[in-house]
Image (cartoon, rainbow, N blue to C red):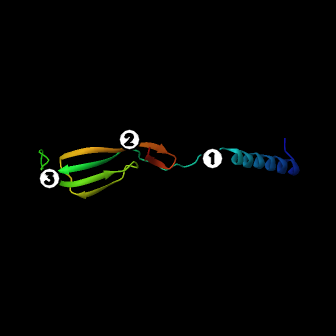
C-alpha cells in the first residue's frame, strides 16, 4: 500500500518533531571536571638524616592534591596536618 505524498510529508514532519522534542527534553549530563581530593592539607618537613639534624626542604600539599616543594625531599620527614579537606562542587576545600 502506497502512501500519498501528503501523508508521507505528514509522517516525516511528525517523526522529525518527535525526535526534536526528545532531544529538547532529554536531561543533559553536565560534564564535571575530574577532581583530585586528598583527605588532609598538610606540610611535610624533610631532614638530612634519621636523627633530623637539619631541615633540607619543606612541602605543602593543598586540598586539591597539588603542592609546592621548597628545597629537596628525602626519606627522612615529618608530616603535620594543617586542615581536613571537604568536597566542593568545584574541587576540594579546607573544612
Depth check, front residue: 44 or 12: 44
Q: Nearer the viewer, mark 1 or mark 2?
A: 2
Residue 90 in the figure: left or right of residue 76: right
**Callouts 1 and 2 close, C-beta under 8 Å:** no
**Callouts 1 and 3 close, C-beta under 8 Å:** no
Task: Determine crowd level at label 1: few under 14, some 14-19, many 20+ residues with C-alpha closer than 10 A.
Answer: few
**The C terminus lies in which quarter of the figure?**
top left
Q: Residue 54 — which label?
A: 3
- Tell me which residue sits at (28%, 44%) in the image: 80
Residue 41 in the figure: left or right of residue 15: left
Query: In the orientation shown, which residue stands out farthest toward the bottom?
Result: 71
Q: Position of residue 87 (x, y in %)?
A: 47, 43
- Tell me which residue sits at (12%, 50%) in the image: 53
At numbered mark 2, what does the secondary structure look like: helix, strand or loop? loop
Q: Which residue is mark 1?
A: 28
Q: Position of residue 6 (x, y in %)?
A: 88, 51
Q: Is residue 34 visible?
A: no
Task: Determine crowd level at label 2: few under 14, some 14-19, many 20+ residues with C-alpha closer than 10 A.
Answer: some
Q: In the displayed structure, would residue 69 be above or below residue 63?
A: below
Task: Determine crowd level at label 3: few under 14, some 14-19, many 20+ residues with C-alpha closer than 10 A.
Answer: few
Going from N to C along the chain, the mark reached first, 1 or 2, is 1
Going from N to C along the chain, the mark reached first, 3 or 2, is 2
Q: Which residue is mark 2?
A: 39
Q: Is residue 24 visible?
A: yes
- Tell me which residue sits at (27%, 56%) in the image: 69
Alpha carbons under labels 3 and 2: distance apart: 28 Å
**The N terminus lies in which quarter of the figure?**
top right
Going from N to C along the chain, the mark reached first, 1 or 3, is 1
At numbered mark 3, what does the secondary structure look like: helix, strand or loop? loop
Amino acid at each position: 500500500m502506497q502512501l500519498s505524498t501528503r501523508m508521507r510529508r505528514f509522517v516525516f514532519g511528525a517523526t522529525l518533531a518527535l525526535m526534536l522534542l526528545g532531544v529538547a527534553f532529554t536531561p543533559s549530563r553536565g560534564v564535571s571536571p575530574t577532581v583530585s581530593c586528598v583527605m588532609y592539607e598538610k606540610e611535610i618537613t624533610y631532614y638530612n638524616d634519621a636523627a633530623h639534624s637539619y631541615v633540607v626542604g619543606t612541602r605543602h600539599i593543598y586540598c586539591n592534591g597539588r603542592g609546592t616543594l621548597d628545597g629537596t625531599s628525602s626519606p627522612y620527614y615529618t608530616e603535620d596536618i594543617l586542615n581536613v579537606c571537604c568536597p566542593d562542587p568545584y574541587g576540594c576545600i579546607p573544612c
